[in-house]
Image (cartoon, coloured by chain):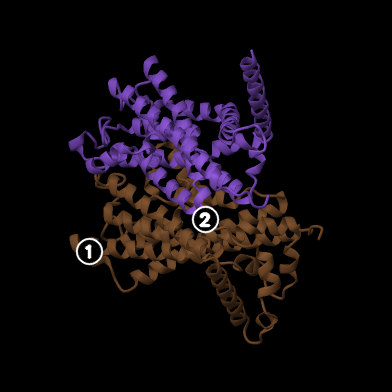
Amino acid sequence: MTSAATWGSELRKWWTFFQISLNERLVYRGDFMLGTLMRFLPTLTQIFLWWAIFESLPAAVGGAGGEGGRIAGYRYGDMVAYYLLITISRAFSSMPGLTSGIAKMVRSGELKKYLIQPVDLLTCLLIQRVAHKLVYYLIATVPFALVFFLCRQFFIDGWPSAEVLAVFAMSLVLSFLLGFFLEACLGLVSFWLLEVTSLAFIYMLMNFLLSGHMFPLDLLPEWSRWLVDCLPLKYLAYFPAAVFLGKVEGEAMYWGLLIEAAWVLFFVVLSAFLWTRGLVRYSGFGG
Amino acid sequence: MADRAGEGRAQPVKALMRNDLKQSDLTATGSPLRRYWRVFATFARNSIIRDMSFRSDFILQSITSVSWAVMNYVLFKLIYRFTTSIGPDTGWQENEFFVFLGTVWVINGSIQLLFMGNFDEFSDLIRTGGLDFALLKPIDTQFLISFPRMNWSQVPNIVLGILLVVTSMNAMWSDSSKGAWFTWWTVPAYVFFVGCGITIMYSVMISLASTSIWLGRNQNLYDFWFYITNFYRYPMEIYQRGSLGWALWGTFTFVIPILVVSNVPARVLANPLGGPWNAWEWSLVGLTLAMTLASLILSRLVFRSALNSYRSASS
């Protein structure tokens, strides 16, 4: 009986958090839609850049303006589709301000606010993120749908099968969790380092290059490809897009999903560990 | 992508204007040119002192901008594993393209070194009424708000750009007949057209910054900067396909001439097509000269008329 009651109050508590965060975000919706559209401008230059590159492929690989030209297995349409899909992966996995936010709370002593309340910091932040992301999807759907509709010709093979779509969706949800817990761990390191700017910066660079944000990881030469496959970063951008485009299929697709889930679990455990250990060191100055 | 993450945030221009400029700098006798030079030198010196007092921040900023550049280099190294040129028959082969890329780094670095941070601060000056202090000084206001804070952390990027240009030119000579076209005036012409490019970008950015007088709080200028530089980061030939592409090409060559910013200097040096220039290449050069002059004059007019609408803010 009592446990049911506590569960109920827990849930109500988190629900309130969720609603506050939701409303917080809905305030700036107009600005936001325009901003999202602007964000596709770089994709426009990518379309023309790759168009020019694919047109100049040597005839030996089926290029010379022909339809059959491929770069690392990508046709021109695939390449553009990849960059478009990356914007979706990033909409799930990017966590602006998470690492620096946690570090700031630790440094300024604001963390006390969470310690004296019967709430858990990480859960709290997670719920905030979910709310913010949901609002983002709600508003960004319009510009995203518009851009994807205008660019539908680049998805040469049309919609993938329902099975692939399901795996794609799951990989996106996992990439959100992975992004969250990975960056939370970086933020929690500030219990020891206080200043994590450089750490966050190194992470940002690595992420940009090795997650597939900048280019499809298939372009990488063999030896470095192995390295990238060992890192969790590729699940933040490359993997969902690759699933959608059929670059990873069949059994490999499910293995990928499993490994991604394992990485999520790893960072959940790590963040819990850093949190309990960090609190022992924390002295709560200022605030 | 996301080039702007590491851009340095300039310190408020206001403080510089009130304290760091000595009266003697402003009222120094002698030719006006000399006076402007002395003020400019003071700005440069003060900025370097400021940068050096936040040293780790300075180093982090330098590393950021250099890292973005290097990652861009890696991307094109990868792309040239699969193709020999960007666009068929454009002549932008690997070495030629890296001359182009190096030029983009030099131009972008110079813009950020000289004035980008100041323009970003300009909307703050309007909003807080800090512009009053600049208007009271016995020196041209446009000059005063353009250069007070230099972002020295961009220097490594410029140096890297020059290195890339030099090594790529070197590689080009050793494997083709390109050297024949290179004469004593090529380097001066290159430097001159890099200057033209920076001037055009200066005009575009100050015009954008001026609009914040009319519009109140402006969007972060670095966003605009990011989207604009995004277009001139690649050879203009890539836009010459499809109706949308030609429309973009036309707009950004003749209306807002940002494509010539990087394309003309890089073309002068790399001469991608080899041999003597075609008529259209010469016209492009002529266009650049005309556009540089026109944009400078136009932006001056825009700034002046914007200033006329300035009504200060409560102090």
The label on residue B173 is: 1
Chain that is brown in the image: B
**Residue A37 or B140: which is nearer the viewer?**
A37
Q: Secondary structure at mark 1?
A: helix
Asked if residue B223 is positioned above or below residue B140 in the image, the reply reads above
Q: Residue furthest right?
A: B314
As drawn, the label of residue B251 is none
Task: Name the kind of residue labelled 1 in the image.
Answer: Trp
C-alpha gap between disc 1 and disc 2:
35 Å
Q: Residue at x 56, y 59 (%)?
A: B116
Q: Amino acid at mark 2?
A: Glu
Drawn side of residue B228 relative to residue B125, left or right: left
The x, y position of residue A83, in whole percent, is: 41, 35
Name the foreground residue: B160 vs A234.
A234
Residue at position x 22%, y 64% in the image = B173
Task: Give the vertical position of A7 relative to A195 (above or below).
Answer: above
Q: What chain is colored purple? A: A
- The image quadrant where one finds the C terminus of chain B is bottom right
Q: Residues within 10 Å of mark 2 (few under 14, many from 20)?
A: some
Instruction: Name the mark nearer the viewer: 1 or 2.
Output: 2
Depth check, front residue: B242 or B279: B242
Return the chain for callout 1: B
Question: Do marks 1 and 2 both belong to one polypeptide chain?
Answer: yes
